Image: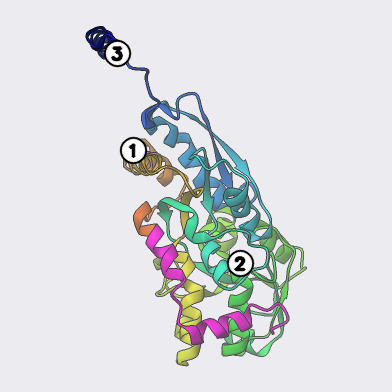
Amino acid sequence: MDHGRTIAVAGALLLTLALSPAAPAQSGDDFYRGKTISMIIPIGPGGAYDAYARMVGRYLGKYLPGNPTIVARNMPGAGGVIGSNYLYNVAPQDGTTLEVITSSFASQQVIGDPQIKYDARQLLAIGRLLDTTSVVFFGHTSAIKTLNELRTEPSTVAISTLTEISAVRLRAMNRYLGMQMKLISGYPSARDYVLAVQRGETDGGTSTFIGLSQLFAADLEQKNLNVLVQFAAERDPAMFDVPTVLELTKDEEARQVFAFLDSNDAVGRSLFTTPNVPADRLALLRAAFDKVLADADFVAEAERLKLPLATKSGEEVQKLVLGTFDIPQAALARVLELSQPSTK
C-alpha cells in the first residue's frame, strides 16, 4: 500500500469538505415558516374563552419567526374536556396546536373526572391572560333572591356535566353551607346556562364572572341576573358587595375544600400547547406571547373589547398547575366524595 498516496488523497478530501458549504439545518427560527397553527377554543363561540383566544390569535403570529397563520377552532363539550383531550392525545406534539385551556383542567384531573384522558402536568404553559372568578347566579324571576333563601328554598342550577369542578363546588355548598341546589346537567356553556334561566328551565347557573360580563352585561346591570356567591380567595373589585364562599363558613374542613375548588381560577385564561414540544420551540412561543402582551395595539384592543388582563408567565402558570396536585390528603378525600354525581 502506498501510504504517501493514501495520506495525500485523505488530505485532499478533508480540504474539499472544509471548503464546501455545509448543508443548512432547520433552526428553531425556521420551523414556523409556512406553517398553520391551530388555536383550540374549548367552549362554543361568543364567550370569554372565545374572545381571548381569537384576540391572541390575531397577534401571536406577528411575533413568531416565519409569521405562521393562526386559525381558531371551537371544540366545545364536556365542560372543556373534549378540547384538552384532543390537545393531549390527537394534536401534533410540535408546537402547532395551542389551546386557551379551561381553568379547571388540572383540578378536574385531581378529582378523577372519568372523561379526562390527559395528564395536566404534561401540557406546556405558554402564559396567562387573566385570572378568573366564578359565581353562582339566579334569574330575577326565581324565588331565590338572597343567600338565606338559597339555604331555605330548593333551587335548580344549570351546569355542563355532573363531574366537572362547577358541580363539585355546588355539592360542597349543599354539604357545608346547607344549600338545596339540584344540578341540571347537559348545557354546553355559560350562554346556555343563562338561556336556561331565561326560559324558566332552571333557577340559576354558574359561570365565570368575565364570561357573564362579556355575554350578558346588560342583564347584570339591570339585575336580571343576580349574583349571590363568588369563588375566590378575596372579593373581586367588580363584585365587592358579593361574598366569597370562604366567608360563609368557619369550618376548617370546609375551608380547605373550598380553597382547593377555588384554586383553578388562578389558572384562568391561560394558553397551553401539547406535551413534548422541543424546549427551543416552547421558548419561541413564550417569548412571542410576552411580546403580544406588550403590544400597544393588543392592549388597546383588549380595553376596547372589555377584556381585562392579569398576566403571568408560562413558567409561573406551570407552577400553578403542579401546585394543584398538592392538596392535603384529608381535604382531597372530602373533595373526591363530593365529586361523585350521586352525592347531594
Q: Is residue 288 left or right of residue 167?
A: left
- 284 vs 19, nearest the viewer: 19
Instruction: Label 2: state its secondary structure.
Output: strand
Q: Pointers 1 and 3 in contact (CB under 8 A)?
A: no
User: What numbered label is drawn on residue 225?
Assistant: 2
Pointer 3 residue: 17
Q: Who comes first in sequence, dot 2 or dot 3? A: 3
Image coordinates of residue 209 in percent, x first then y, are 52, 63
Image coordinates of residue 333 in percent, x first then y, are 56, 84
Q: Quadrant of the C terminus?
A: bottom right
- 173 vs 281, nearest the viewer: 281
The magenta segment: 318-344
Looking at the rendered structure, the kind of residue marked 2 is: Leu
* Magenta-drawn stretch contains 329: yes
User: Which residue is drawn at the image coordinates 44% and 29% (left, top)?
Assistant: 31
Pointer 1 residue: 295
